[in-house]
Image (cartoon, rainbow, N blue to C red):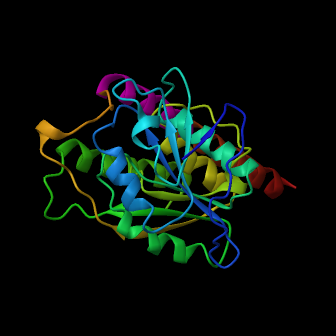
Amino acid sequence: MIAVQQNGRIPVLCPEKSKGKRVCAVIPVYNNGSTVRPVAEKTLRYISNLLILDDGSTDIDLKAILADLPLVYCRQEPNLGKGAALRRALRLLADSGFDYMLTLDADGQHDPADIPAFLKLAENRGNLLVIGCRDFTGQPVPSGSRLGRKISNLLLKLECGIPTADSQSGFRMYPVRILADLPFRCSRFDFETEVLAMAAQAGADFLDIPVKVHYPPMRDRITHFRPLPELTRLTRLHFQLLTKRLSRKKRHSERILRREKK
């Protein structure tokens, strides 16, 4: 394991490329000490560059339990949120020359065996944002996840025209160069919505691919999603996005009217 300091760069553990595109997997972690190692081990079967971004975990010495694995470890303190961790990772990858950031969760709900499908899509272009669309059939999926996905998909379609069937999936591949310098504001779970909206505005292309998902029994499930504060942030963000959309449409209509009057 290689530890990265606050302003360090990520060493390329393997010079592998997907036809010229360099990809690094990123697993943000906060108190997932019981699941992160098996997720990391399985991820390394499919990709050689892996960054573990420890968002101030307190449940276990994460650095110690991952010490023998060929990955890069970076810790930020205090706990700043999943969005802040992904923004930090995005900046590190941009500074280190990577083209794509492939993200998956530390709790084991995403199957690293789906990674090759993402890597294949990285071969052709550098502006593609790939979203792993979770298969909810035959799974004990929380009702909030089903409903939340439908609402979020509809809102993002209205606000930004984003054509995705799973806007809440954390299993994604981001185009680093397009996103690294964008002025993101969100730092919690709302970042995963904000980044889609800003990527659309920056000209990224979107593509869904099917992925497997595993939800453990409720007694074994670890979640850091706090409904009231997180839903408040998401509601505020969607209101801002919708307001911007309506404002753009209004300005467009005004320009058309001015041209017609001339």
Residue 256 image offset from top left, x and y in percent: 75, 55
In percent of width and height, residue 158 lies at 48, 52
In the displayed structure, 118 sits above or below 194; it is: below
Q: Residue at x 81, y 50 (%)?
A: 258
The correct choice, above or below, for 115 with respect to 242 in the image is below
Residue drawn at point x = 67 percent, y = 48 percent: 10
Q: Is residue 67 above or below residue 167?
A: above
Judged from this view, the residue extending furthest toward the right is 262
Q: Residue at x 57, y 59 (%)?
A: 49
Viewer-closest of 206 and 2? 2
Residue stretch in magenta: 227-241
* 113 relative to 260, above or below: below
Q: Quadrant of residue 44?
A: bottom left
Residue 39 among magenta residues: no
Q: Position of residue 122 (x, y in %)?
A: 59, 72
Farthest-out residue, top = 78
Q: Is residue 15 visible?
A: yes
The answer to which of 258 and 107 lies nearer the viewer is 107
Give the x, y percent position of residue 155: 43, 47
Between 155 and 175, the residue placed more toward the observer is 175
Q: Dividing the picture into quarters, in which one does residue 97 lie?
A: bottom right
Q: Main secondary structure of the magenta part?
A: helix
Task: Please state if 59 lies on the left or on the right of 48 as rendered.
Answer: left
